[in-house]
């Protein structure tokens, strides 16, 4: 299978990398993380001007109809740059509206505003008790006088407090349905906090909160799973960018750090370790690219198989490369003053978002044909 990017995709990636290298250096990123908002409105406007916010939105709503492979190109650069703006959360929210909504009326308006960078979105996948089970949903929806209200709690919602609208799964008459909720809706609250990787997350609470049901023909549990798979594909792509940057930073450091009068990069044992880091990254890259291609498959099991294989391998690579990078940097490898520590932290969070290695190995093994086919 040819995983070469088109000229347009490569040019898009190059433009984004140039912007991040010039304007989003490590010190600038750290200043954003330490700020009260935790994100930068100026950089979000720049992303909009570059076309990032319009990329995943359908053309009918002013976007570019970018698929998972197009998004992979972008997410790799954002992972390399340790970007903390809520791009992943908004892109996944756009996919939720595209899949679960009607792509007209209020849904179309939200998509058009997202393309223009006017609003940010977030999908509330997690509940406090559910761990990685997407379908263990306790949040309830009720219909009252033709309107819907939600009651429940969502946890670890990526950039939940920065989002203008939330996509919320809830139980309606025993079935999972998806709802759009405004951050300004009555009886809705978001408790914002910083995660260990410098990103933001929130706990959302609803108490008879007004909501609008996304009533597209594909709304429901299967659509929620597909939305999560899309989020995983994007996380895997971000991880590849972070792994590439971490490998490069480690090699550069070993060329300058001296022991016994010579750079430690000359020690054969350390060279072997850095080669193993590269091998882990390349194996993870292959599966991440395959997952991006297979996401569009009409065969749900084929999509699940590729996505879970990629997420499991990414998690393994993230742990191995991160641990080796920290060791090769020495004691300073765990300090906040070194970028390597922040790539490691981001990779650790990616590994546990929407299912860790064990979860996805179990999901992969549970798919039809695992016991009889050779993977």
Image (cartoon, rainbow, N blue to C red):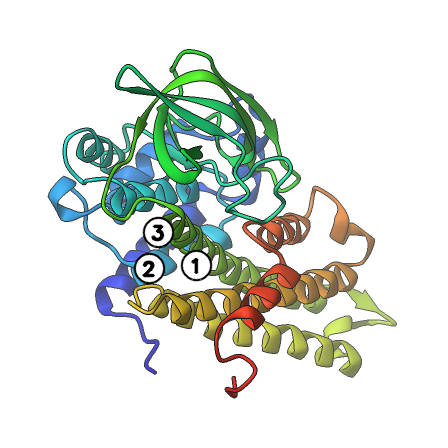
Q: Which residue is mark 2?
A: 68
Whether 249 is drawn above or below 267: the answer is above
Q: Residue at x 26, y 19 (%)?
A: 146
Q: Residue at x 56, y 64 (%)?
A: 363
Q: Secondary structure at mark 1?
A: helix
Residue farthest along the left direction in this orientation: 60
- Horizontal and vertical percent position of residue 233: 43, 59
Q: Secondary structure at mark 3?
A: helix
Q: Which mark is residue 233?
A: 1
Q: Badge 2 local density, few (<14 within 10 Å), some, or many (20+)?
A: many
Q: Which residue is mark 3?
A: 16
Residue 75 falls left or right of residue 311: left
Q: Secondary structure at mark 2?
A: helix
- Earlier in the chain: of badge 2 and badge 1, it is 2
Residue 57 falls left or right of residue 230: left
Q: Badge 3 local density, few (<14 within 10 Å), some, or many (20+)?
A: many
Distance between mark 2 and mark 1 Cα atoms: 7 Å
Q: Residue at x 66, y 53 (%)?
A: 344
Residue 184, can we see it?
Answer: yes
Distance between mark 3 and mark 1 Cα atoms: 19 Å
- Earlier in the chain: of badge 3 and badge 1, it is 3
């Amino acid at each position: 299978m040819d995983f070469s990017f088109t000229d347009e995709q490569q040019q898009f990636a190059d433009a984004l990398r140039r912007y991040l290298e010039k304007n989003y250096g490590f010190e600038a990123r750290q200043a954003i993380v330490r700020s009260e908002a935790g994100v930068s409105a100026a950089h979000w406007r720049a992303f909009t001007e570059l076309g990032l916010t319009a990329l995943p939105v359908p053309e009918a709503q002013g976007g570019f109809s970018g698929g998972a492979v197009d998004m992979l190109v972008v997410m790799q650069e954002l992972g390399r740059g340790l970007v903390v703006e809520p791009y992943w959360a908004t892109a996944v929210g756009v996919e939720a509206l595209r899949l679960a909504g009607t792509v007209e009326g209020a849904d179309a308006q939200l998509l058009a505003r997202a393309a223009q960078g006017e609003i940010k979105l977030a999908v509330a996948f997690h509940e406090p008790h559910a761990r990685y089970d997407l379908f263990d949903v306790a949040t309830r929806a009720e219909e009252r006088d033709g309107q819907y209200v939600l009651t429940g709690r969502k946890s670890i919602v990526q950039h939940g407090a920065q989002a203008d609208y939330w996509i919320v799964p809830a139980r309606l008459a025993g079935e999972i349905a998806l709802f759009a909720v405004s951050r300004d809706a009555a009886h809705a609250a978001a408790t914002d906090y910083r995660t260990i990787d410098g990103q933001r997350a929130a706990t959302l609470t609803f108490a008879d909160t007004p909501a609008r049901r996304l009533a597209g023909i594909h709304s429901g549990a299967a659509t929620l799973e597909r939305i999560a798979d899309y989020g995983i594909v994007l996380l895997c792509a971000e991880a590849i960018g972070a792994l590439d940057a971490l490998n490069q930073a480690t090699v550069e450091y070993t060329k300058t750090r001296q022991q016994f009068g010579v750079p430690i990069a000359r020690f054969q044992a350390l060279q072997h370790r850095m080669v193993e880091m590269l091998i882990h990254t390349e194996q993870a890259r292959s599966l991440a690219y395959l997952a991006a291609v297979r996401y569009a498959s009409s065969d749900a099991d084929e999509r699940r198989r590729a996505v879970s294989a990629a997420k499991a391998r990414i998690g393994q690579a993230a742990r191995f490369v991160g641990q080796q990078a920290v060791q090769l940097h020495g004691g300073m490898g765990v300090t906040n003053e070194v970028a390597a520590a922040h790539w490691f932290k981001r990779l650790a969070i990616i590994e546990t978002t929407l299912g860790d290695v064990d979860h996805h190995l179990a999901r992969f093994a549970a798919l039809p044909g695992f016991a009889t086919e050779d993977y």
